[in-house]
Image (cartoon, rainbow, N blue to C red):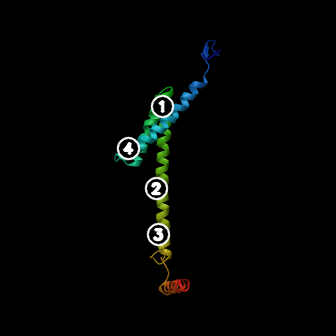
Amino acid sequence: MAKRKKDDSGGTKRKSSGSSKAWAAASAAAGGALGAVGGVLATRVGIEPKTAAIGVTVTGAAGAVFGSGNLRWGSAGVLAAGASQLAIGWLQKKTAEVAQTQAAQAAAAFGGTGPRQGLPGDVAQAFREAREQMEDDYAN
């Protein structure tokens, strides 16, 4: 049983035990996992990822504010999962915008056609002839 110690008011209060901290950590981890899975399942049924992330974040925030005990810790995990989903969505959007900008710049640098693929006709023909010559030399 946890030891009791005197508080400033003259009464006694229960000293926090290690197991309650473990339960709090487990609740936060479980809440984070539940929030992540909930967000993924919401997007699977057709809800926009940003909307799902906002819903998970708001749900977690409400539970963290109005809950108590392990519910509060679990809700904090849900909140963290929702916030990370929002951050990932924002990063994906920014990455897509940067990639699109770079592709447009590359197309403009090559006269609007993009980089050329393959070799020009004369060089490609020279390689074909050299390969055929090597095949003939090694076949004999």
Amino acid beneath label 2: Lys
Q: Secondary structure at mark 2?
A: helix
**At 49% from the left edge and 58% from the top edge, which residue is drawn?**
95
Residue at the disc numbered 2: 93
Residue at the disc numbered 1: 65
**At 47% from the left edge and 28% from the top edge, which residue is drawn?**
67
Q: Which mark is residue 104?
A: 3
Q: CA distance from mark 2 to mark 4?
A: 19 Å
Which residue ends up furthest to the left in the rendered image?
A: 46
Q: Position of residue 68 (x, y in %)?
A: 49, 26
Q: Count residues near mark 2 (Cα–Cα under 10 Å), then give few for <14, some for 14-19, many for 20+.
A: few
Counting residues from the N terminus, which is met first, the one under dot 3 or under dot 1?
Answer: 1
* The N terminus: image quadrant: top right
Marks 2/4 in contact by CB < 8 Å: the verdict is: no
Q: Which mark is residue 42?
A: 4
Counting residues from the N terminus, which is met first, the one under dot 4 or under dot 3?
Answer: 4
**At 41% from the left edge and 48% from the top edge, which residue is drawn?**
50
Q: Is residue 33 above or below residue 87?
A: above
Q: CA distance from mark 3 to mark 1?
A: 47 Å
Q: Secondary structure at mark 4?
A: helix
Mark 1 vs mark 4, foreground winner is 4
Q: CA distance from mark 2 to mark 1?
A: 30 Å
Q: CA distance from mark 4 to mark 3?
A: 34 Å
Counting residues from the N terminus, which is met first, the one under dot 2 or under dot 1?
Answer: 1
Marks 2/3 in contact by CB < 8 Å: the verdict is: no
Q: Position of residue 20 (x, y in %)?
A: 56, 25
**At 46% from the left edge and 36% from the top edge, which residue is drawn?**
60
